[in-house]
Image (cartoon, grey):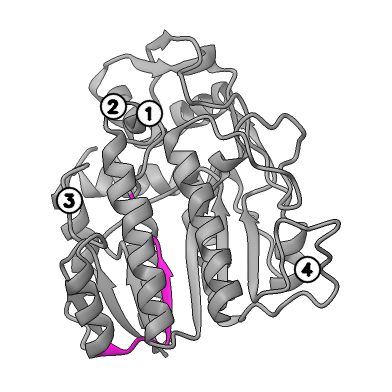
Amino acid sequence: MKIMVTGSAGFIGAALTEKLLKRGDEVIGVDNLNDYYDVNLKRARLARFQTNPAFTEVPIGLENREALRAIFAKYRPQRVVNLAAQAGVRYSLENPYAYMDSNLYGFLNILENCRHYQVEHLVFASSSSVYGANTKMPYAVQDNVDHPLSLYAASKKANELMAHTYSHLYRLPTTGLRFFTVYGPWGRPDMALFKFTRNILAGKPIEVYNYGHHQRDFTYIDDIVEGVTRTLDRLPAPNANWNGATPEPNTSSAPYRIYNIGNHQPVELGKFIKILEECLGREAKKNLLPLQPGDVPATYADVDDLIQDMEFYPATPIEEGIARFVAWYKNYHKVR
C-alpha cells in the first residue's frame, strides 16, 4: 500500500515507518523536524530508512494547510497514520498554543485532506491521558473520558471527537489508538526512561514525582507498532447494534473505533527505577517530589477489544524492554 505516516521522525513514527517499509509498503513520511527535543536524534531515526527508494521524506508541519494539501494531491496515499503532534503533558503547562497549532488545527488539515482525497482509512494517535480524573481501573474504551487533567489530554480527546464527526458526515473510516506510556530504543529524551538513564550514568539525581508511587502501564515500542499495523490493515465498520439511547463511546453507527494499546500490567515507578538500576549496574540518586499538575497517579489499560478484534495482546515484560533500551542507549551514546 501507499501509506502516509505523519511524525515519521518521531519515536513511534520512525519505528512504524521502518516496519511498513520492511513489509513492502510505500511510505510518505511527513515531519517538520521541530526542536522540541534533539533534532539529531530525529535525523538518526530517519537515517535507518532514508535511502530506501520506497520512502519519501516531506519536511512540513501539519498546520501548513496548502503544503499538506499539495502532498496529498501529489502522492494520493491510500491510508494515513497520524502520529505527528505536540507531545508532553508537562510542556502543555508552559506552551499551550503549540498544542492548538499541531494537535487541533493540524489534525483538521489531516481530516480535510483524507476526506477530499478519498483516503481508505485514517489511524490516529490518541493517549491514555484522556482518561484524566477517572479512577476506575483498568481504563476501558467504554468509559466516559470527559474530565481531562491537561491541555494535551484535552487536545487528544478533541481529536477523537473530530474524527468521529468526519466518520459520520463523510463515512471516512477512522481508528483512534490510546497509547499507554510508550518506551524502548530510540525513545524521546523528555520521557522518564531516557532522562533517568542519562542522569544515573552521569551521577546526577533523578526527579521522582509522586514520591515514586506513580503506576504506569509501560508499553514497549514493538508492541505499539504491531498494534498500529494491525489496526491500519483492518478498516472499522459501523456498529449495527449501536444505539443512541445508550451510546457506546468507542464505536458508532459510523465507521469509527477507539482502542487502548497498553501492556495491561501497570508497574510502580519505584520498581521501574529498580529494574533500570540493575540494568545499568548503578544506583540512582533520587530527588523525591510531589505529583505534578496535569499528571495522573496511575494508568492501566483494558485491552479486551484489541485482543478480540486484532488478535493481539501487548506482552513485552518490563525487564526485557528496559534491558533493550539500555543496550541501545549505551551503543547510541557510546557509553561503556
Q: Between 317 and 41, which is closer to the camera in this rendering? A: 41
Query: Which secondary structure lies at badge 3?
Result: loop
Contact, CB < 8 Å: mark 1 with mark 2?
yes
Among the 4 quarters of the image, the one containing residue 89: top left
Q: Is residue 54 visible?
A: no
Mark 1 crowdedness (10 Å alpha carbons): few <14, some 14-19, many ≥20: some
Q: Between 176 and 190, which is closer to the camera in this rendering? A: 176
Q: Can residue 214 be seen in this view?
A: yes
Query: On residue 308, which mark appears?
Result: 4
Q: Does the magenta stretch include residue 326?
A: no
Structural distance between the alpha carbons of marks 1 and 3 = 18 Å
Name the residue at 17% across, 56% down: 33
Contact, CB < 8 Å: mark 1 with mark 3?
no
x and y, in percent, of residue 184 in the image: 43, 49
Image check: 138 left or right of 224?
A: right
Residue position marked by numbered label 3 in the rendering = 34
